[in-house]
Amino acid sequence: MSNPPAEATEESIYKKISDVRNEISSLKEKRYASIEEIRKLRQKKSEKIERLKAVRLQLKTVFEEYTSRINELKELKQKKEQLFEVIKEMRKEFEELRNLMKKTQGLNPDILEKRIRSLEWRIQTSSLTLEEEKKLIQRIADMERRLNEAKKILKVKEKGNEERAEFLAKRIELATIRQKISSLISEISEKRKTLKSLRDERDKLTKELDELSSQIEAKSKEIDELGKQIEAKSKELDELIKARKAMEQGVTTSRANIAEIMEKRKKVAEEKLKKGERLSFDEIYALYGDHRGNNEDGDNIH
């Protein structure tokens, strides 16, 4: 007779071992896929970090250039205001000179000197009454006053001509500064746009890196959890294999014991036959039966 419960238990252990091995294989595949995914995430994160470094360096360079242009613009504006004030004062002086020239229009120093010399000669060579001489002296004094004014105006005019050249140079310088200011304002505007674009990219990269770090952390926890499951299943498999070995060892021991008992009974039966003694059923079975390790025809041997 066979032992169905023992066979069923042995079959269930083999099935369980197969199932656990399949589960371990599946868990390892999932873990490998997660490791590969986390590798790709880390590679992507590394690329983002390198790009972020480049953006920050570029941002620093552009910001320094932007600050330099701002300072340069401030200096040019200050210089422009100073030049504007100088030109304004020079225009005021030219206006005063024009007004003075209008008041003294027709005064010629050479003509006045000739008139003065002529009047002086007349006084010296002519017979004049006291009243006439007095009038001529007054005329000479008036002309000398006008002559001094004319000479002063002449000097001012000469100075004005020199200042006009300087005035023209100042206006050219002012125009050049205004052109530079316009160019700087345009450049500053472009750099401001570049700074905004770089800051937006920096913030975007920082956000993406935070998201990647979260994904990597989640995947790392998933890998750890899968590792724990694999470890637990491996322990379970070890226990099942130990149980299977114990069961196989138990069956082998049982069959060896039965064979040993049958061999002893066979020897006893042979001794009885020699002596002509009566044999029991078990002894007859031990002597003539098929007992090659199988316990058929009965489970109990006495």
Image (cartoon, helix red, strand yellow):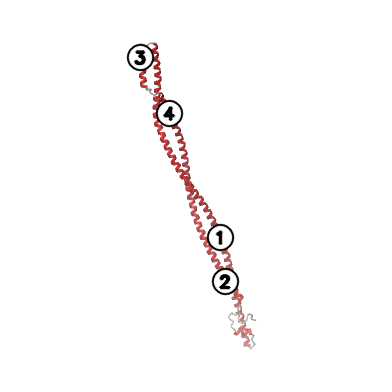
| 38 and 142: which is toward the camera | 142
| 193 and 238: which is toward the camera | 193
| Spot occupied by residue 235 in the image (x, y as percentages of width and height) | 58, 66
Q: Residue at x 45, y 34 (%)?
A: 84
First reached walking from the N terminus: tag 3 or tag 2: 2
Which residue does the numbered mark 1 point to in the structure image?
222
Is label 3 in a helix, a strand or a loop? Answer: helix
Residue type marked 3:
Arg
Which residue does the numbered mark 4 point to in the structure image?
95
Residue type marked 4:
Glu
Using the numbered discs, state the Cα–Cα distance from disc 1 to disc 4 in whole angstroms: 89 Å
**Horizontal side of residue 73 vs 225, given as left or right:** left
First reached walking from the N terminus: tag 4 or tag 3: 4
Residue type marked 1:
Glu
Nearer to us: label 3 or label 2: 3
Mark 2, other Cα within 10 Å: few <14 / some 14–19 / many ≥20: few
Which label is found at residue 15? 2
Which residue does the numbered mark 3 point to in the structure image?
122
Residue type marked 2:
Lys
Using the numbered discs, state the Cα–Cα distance from disc 3 to disc 1 in whole angstroms: 128 Å
First reached walking from the N terminus: tag 3 or tag 1: 3
